[in-house]
């Protein structure tokens, strides 16, 4: 299989690259930090490194074309690059809203826009022409306090995936959204740097390793499905939260620092 992963220099993207390399995939890996990317690519059997800032939509689109040119085809495009912002709704500035939406939402939309015509031109293999996989979050279904802009960007990614999945189903192009819970990656350090404060929760919050998330994603690349919830019980808890918002508000308030 030929797979592009954005945000592959660290965390979930890096773990997914390792997992897919272990399963025999040919990889193109994208991120901004060339040195980290080169190291991950070398560990993944000489994967193709693509230095790219997905906050620039034209660059995000170009990266998909470069991956296809290097690999010859694209079975799955994993749109994973993103960052977090710890800020209340009241104190999030326009500049912060625009910056996070530019990377997390518009970078993802540009990747999908570039990928779809390429996937459409490919013959069907094992039931699919190809797949777009979008790494949203469990917060895409129910926002947490102090994460308004981040959660909104993740909800928008989910909407993008839901719409595109139905639009593209008849052409045998799969669209999969991924909804990790708290995952032990450098995400929280980067978020603290950007925000000037930690994105922290009180009490016990479900937590997984990037390797656990990567295995669930790799399974959904082998057999495409609409959504991936690597921490399964969270899916049902969040479904309940959408039915009982007052209860969910009380639980969220209890986790607030
Ligand atoms: N960790 C969690 O608890 C958690 C939970 C739910 C969802 N997620 C989502 O999972 C995805 C991966 O996060 P992670 O936990 O693996 O965090 P991470 O370790 O910080 O990785 C983020 C990746 O995105 C890349 N990236 C960030 N901004 C970019 C940009 N403008 N252009 C290109 N690449 C960019 C980073 O590479 P460079 O800095 O080298 O560009 C890095 O490779 C994110 O979309 C995040 O929202 C994370």
Image: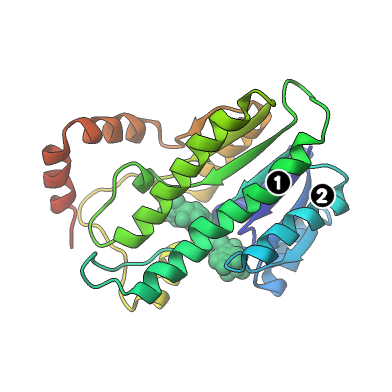
Left or right of 254: which side holds 166?
Answer: right
Relative to residue 203, is residue 71 drawn left or right? right
Badge 1 vs badge 2, beta-carbon distance below 8 Å: no
| Residue 194 in the image: above or below residue 221 | below
Could you classify mark 2 by the number of other residues whose Cα lies within 10 Å: few (under 14), some (14-19), or many (20 or more)? Answer: many
Colour basis: rainbow
Relative depth, front residue between 123 and 147:
123
Q: Nearer the viewer, mark 1 or mark 2?
A: 1
| Residue 115, label in figure | 1
- Label 1 neighbourhood size at 10 Å, few (<14), some (14-19), many (20+)? many
Q: Is residue 79 above or below residue 212?
A: below
Residue at 44% over, 35% down = 229
At horizontal 38% and vertical 46% (from top left) the residue drawn is: 140
User: Relative to the observer, which residue lies in front, 133 or 212?
Assistant: 133
- Whichever of labels 1 and 2 marks the residue nearer the N terminus, that label is 2
Residue 136 appears at what percent x and percent y?
Answer: 47, 47
Q: Nearer the viewer, residue 126 or 100?
A: 100
User: Could you say which quadrant of the image residue 30 lies in?
Assistant: bottom right
Mark 2 — residue? Answer: 68
Quadrant location, the N terminus: top right
User: Residue placed at 81% from the left, 36% from the top?
Assistant: 121
Can you give x and y, in whole percent of width and height, for residue 37 in the image? Answer: 70, 66
């Amino acid at each position: 299989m030929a797979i592009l992963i954005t945000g592959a220099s660290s965390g979930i993207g890096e773990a997914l690259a390792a997992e897919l390399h272990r399963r025999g995939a040919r990889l193109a890996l994208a991120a901004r930090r060339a040195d980290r990317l080169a190291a991950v690519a070398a560990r993944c059997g000489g994967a193709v490194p693509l230095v790219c800032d997905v906050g620039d939509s034209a660059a995000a689109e170009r990266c998909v074309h470069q991956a296809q040119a290097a690999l010859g085809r694209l079975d799955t495009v994993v749109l994973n690059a993103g960052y977090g912002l710890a800020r209340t709704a009241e104190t999030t500035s326009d500049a912060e809203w625009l910056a996070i939406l530019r990377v997390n939402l518009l970078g993802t939309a540009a990747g999908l826009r570039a990928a779809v015509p390429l996937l459409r031109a490919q013959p069907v293999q094992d039931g699919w022409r190809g797949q777009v996989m979008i790494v949203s979050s469990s917060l895409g279904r129910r926002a947490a306090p102090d994460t308004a802009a981040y959660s909104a960007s993740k909800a928008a990614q989910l909407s993008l995936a839901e719409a595109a999945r139905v639009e593209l189903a008849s052409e045998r192009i799969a669209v999969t959204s991924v909804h990790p819970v708290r995952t032990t990656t450098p995400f929280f350090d980067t978020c603290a740097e950007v925000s000037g404060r930690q994105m922290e929760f009180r009490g016990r919050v479900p937590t997984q390793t990037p390797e656990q998330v990567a295995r669930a994603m790799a399974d959904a690349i082998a057999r495409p499905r609409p959504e991936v919830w690597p921490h399964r019980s969270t899916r049902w808890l969040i479904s309940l939260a959408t039915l009982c918002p007052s209860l969910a508000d009380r639980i969220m308030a209890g986790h607030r620092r």
